[in-house]
Image: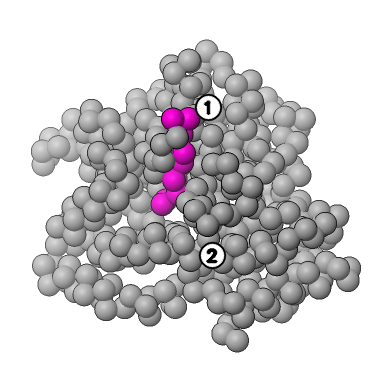
Amino acid sequence: MRKIQMVDLKGQYAEIKKEVNDSIQEVLETTAFVNGPKVHEFQKNLENYLGVKHVIPCANGTDALQIAMMGLGLKPGDEVITADFTFAATVEVIALLNLTPVLVDVDPETFNIDIDAVKKAITPKTKAIVPVHLFGQCANMDALMALAKEHNLYIIEDNAQGIGAKYKNSKGEKVMSGTIGHVASTSFFPSKNLGCYGDGGAIFTNDDDLAHIIRGIVNHGMYKRYHHDVVGVNSRLDSIQAAVLDAKLPHLDSYNNKRRNAAKKYNKAFTNHPKITTPKTVNGCDDICDACDCHVFHQYTLKIKNADRDALAKHLNDNGIPCGVYYPIPLHKQKAYLDSRYKEEDFVVTNQLVKEVISLPMHTELDDEQIDFITNTIINFIDNN
């Protein structure tokens, strides 16, 4: 059996080596390393893939989220609601801009932001909501867009984990994640479903005026060289990373299908186990159906009930199976984001999830032998401890 990787970038590269190398070589020969033709080519191709009017590439996913908020003109003291159960970057940028983060609980099945919790958290100071499309599927965007309309709020989609997922709206239409809210951000960190070979990110919007503002912000506030019209930052996707992404973009749907197929095999192995809860998909699916496109499984995350999750994680590592706990500490308990406003009774789901969740290897190169070994190791450990 091949060595099991949490993310097998080496195996993925081997499959597309010529395409990636040729794309990078093109950049090397033009020597247009910053804001070169490859960046614009990738931008246009991603716009076409997503069906969104504007893709603005930038240096990384955290910058993308920060720049989206800057573009909306949010002011210090404005409240921004987001999920407690996610990576710190989401709340980090809120704090960096001197906005007021408001953390709320999540849904126990999808792990996405809880709509009732959002409703309770809205105040006259609320200006935006940031749903995180966690682990690869969309939050309840219909409900969130309705709240935004009712309270005159912005919706900023954190799509770092969900690129390529589709969301079926209340009209029965399927739309791409990251194209529904007023603006969205994504990350191209190497381990993402669409990842480059360094850091990279992008902002998406259908708003022409907002796109214009953001294009200035990412480039020192300039639309014309040495004319600084807005306060900006230096956050550009370099041409070599764009070359990698442009080579990989045509494979994204295939990559996501491979992830779904691996998830199906995981689910089948764990079916009806009393101590293991497998991921739930939305869009009306009780499981991962053959037509499923609502979940792209950036992570495959189990809930372990009435068993020692931490002992299981150690056992897996001891047996050569990497795993991850995303996330071990809720944001509202992180030292940087402690706030007397938060009450533990408002985070019942998150506080339970951090004790139960464990993410298994998930990538495009997983094979049946590896999946069998992983699932058998987990079941045998839980059944015998």
Task: Locate residue 298, reporting x and y percent.
Answer: 52, 57
Q: Which residue is mark 1?
A: 143
Please tell me the numbered disc located at residue 261.
2
Above/below status of 21 relative to 82: below
Front residue (pair 115, 85): 115
The answer for how far apart the CA atoms under marks 2 and 1 are is 29 Å
User: Does 160 lie within the magenta span?
Assistant: yes
Tell me the magenta residue range: 157-171
Determine which quarter of the picture holds residue 256: bottom left
**Residue drawn 62% across the image and 44% down it:** 110
Give percent across and percent down for residue 40. 18, 52
At 32% from the left and 41% from the top, the residue drawn is: 204
List x then y, in percent, for residue 302. Answer: 69, 57
Mark 2 and mark 1 lie on one chain; the one further toward the N terminus is 1
Q: Is the N terminus in the top left, top right, bottom left or bottom right quadrant?
A: bottom right
Residue at 29% x, 43% y is 51
- Which residue is nearer to you in this view: 347 or 91? 347
What amino acid type is highlighted by mark number 1? Ala
Q: Secondary structure at mark 1?
A: helix
What quarter of the picture does the C terminus occupy? bottom right
Q: Is residue 248 magenta?
A: no
- Nearer the observer: mark 2 or 1; the answer is 2
Q: Residues within 10 Å of mark 1 (few under 14, many from 20)?
A: few
Identify the main secondary structure in magenta: loop
